[in-house]
């Protein structure tokens, strides 16, 4: 599976995160990295599908990132977060 995110997230002054990439597209946005989100990520990886995860629990974000997963802190219910996750290209 090719890596879809080129850099880690940063925190601009407005509190939103930014994903720096050369163009993320044809990916799945997984909302949450709890037990179900982790299972979804496991299956997406087995299917060789590009994905990223949005999670609002900082502890789960750290867990996912420690596993090398593209997990980003943010509320998937916010339009600006979805825009930063390239929802229009997924």
Image: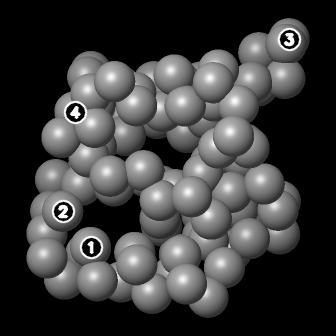
Label 1–label 2 contact, CB within 8 A: yes
Q: Position of residue 87 (x, y in %)?
A: 40, 31
Labels 4 & 1 near each other (Cβ < 8 A):
no
Q: Quadrant of the C terminus?
A: top left
Give the mark nearest the N terminus, 4 or 1: 4
The residue singled out by tag 1 in the image is 44
Q: Is residue 77 left or right of residue 25?
A: right
* Marks 1 and 2, the one that precedes in the sequence: 1
| SS assignment at label 4 | loop
Residue 49: assigned label: 2
Labels 3 and 1 touching (C-beta < 8 A): no
Around disc 3, counting alpha carbons within 10 Å, would you say few (fewer than 14), some (14 to 19), or many (20 or more)?
few
Can residue 90 be seen here? yes
Mark toward the start of the polypeptide (4 vs 2) = 4
The local secondary structure at tag 1 comes to helix
Compare marks 3 and 1 and give the one earlier in the sequence.
3
Outermost residue to the top? 13
- Within the image, what quadrant is residue 40 found in? bottom left
Residue at the disc numbered 4: 25
Disc on the earlier residue, 2 or 3: 3
């Amino acid at each position: 599976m090719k890596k879809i995110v080129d850099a880690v997230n940063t925190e601009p002054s407005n509190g939103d995160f930014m994903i720096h990439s050369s163009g993320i597209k044809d990916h799945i946005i997984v909302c949450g990295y709890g037990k179900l989100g982790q299972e979804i990520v496991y299956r997406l990886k087995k299917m060789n599908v590009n994905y990223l995860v949005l999670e609002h629990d900082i502890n789960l974000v750290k867990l996912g990132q420690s596993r090398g997963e593209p997990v980003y802190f943010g509320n998937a219910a916010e339009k600006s977060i979805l825009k930063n996750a390239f929802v229009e290209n997924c």
